[in-house]
Image: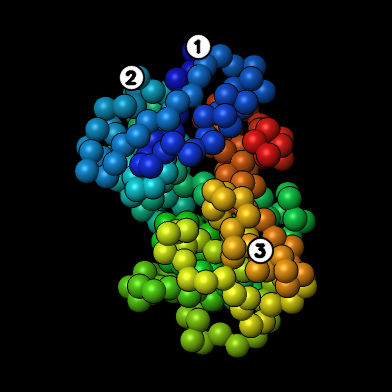
Amino acid sequence: MNWRVGVVGFPIEHSLSPQLHEFGLRRAGLIGSSERIPLPLERAGELVSLMGNPFDALSVTMPLKKVAAEICLGLDPVAQRLGVVNTLRFRDGVLEGCALDGPGFISALEGEWGVSAAGLRVLIDGAGGSALAIVDALATQGAASITVRARNPESAERLRQISPIVQTFEEFDGALDLVINTTPSSTRVAAFVDRGVSAETVAIDVTYDPLWSPWRQAYADHGCRTSSGLAMLAYQAALTMQWWWGVEQSGHDLLEAIS
């Protein structure tokens, strides 16, 4: 079989998913190719026509994750809970969706930094789609507390409804094991280091363009271990391709392929 896969969203020019997909295809001993499909939200109705012909499977990025979930006939439990997907596959005439951003983050946290989510005290900047997935995954894996800092009160409240361990920034007062920035680069405020941070804190910026953001640099200067979002991307891609093909993939190997 010649696998036809890709990544769909907008903007999409910067996406490293095609490199990851084609590396994964070779690693699995499969034949196929991957491409970028630019599709803005106003053309989201075209998404369903992409599946089955010409594409067997797609990674889905912003702003289409909610729309993609709505067109699926089958959803995994996380996607059902959150109402978003980040990957689609067409199997036996049925369009299925899966939400793997959160599990990908947890896998990267453990695989690259040796950090378990259990018992973590976490601060998350932002309350969009990435924050939603990460909060859900951290709560499921037993984080001790998750503090959310968001400009939109409605988005923050949606995150609070995920678990009783989620609180707003105004309620926070304590030490932090993990700080995550999920805000778009274009809307960020000046970089600063939050209270409760120490040299033991891990700081992760989910963006990978640029790799070294001013936010990440501020935490590195404070002595924290820091990372861009490349690891989350690679480990999420590994889970995605395992779901597509039933062949185990290594998030670490995928990360090395794009680093």
Do we see residue 69 in this rendering?
A: no
Residue that mark 2 sits on: 53
Q: Quadrant of the C terminus?
A: top right
Task: Say if mark 2 contacts mark 3, CB within 8 Å.
Answer: no
Residue at 35%, 73% (x, y): give it.
152
Residue 173 lies, with reference to residue 204, above or below; the image says: below
Gap in angstroms between the C-alphas marked 2 and 3 = 44 Å
Residue at 36%, 69% (x, y): give it.
155
Residue 225 lies, with reference to residue 145, above or below; the image says: above
Residue that mark 1 sits on: 1
Colour scheme in use: rainbow
> Which element type, helix, strand or loop, lies under badge 2?
loop
Residue at 52%, 34% (x, y): give it.
17
Task: Say if mark 1 contacts mark 2, CB within 8 Å.
Answer: no
Rendered image: mark on residue 217: 3
Which kind of residue does numbered mark 2 sit on?
Asn
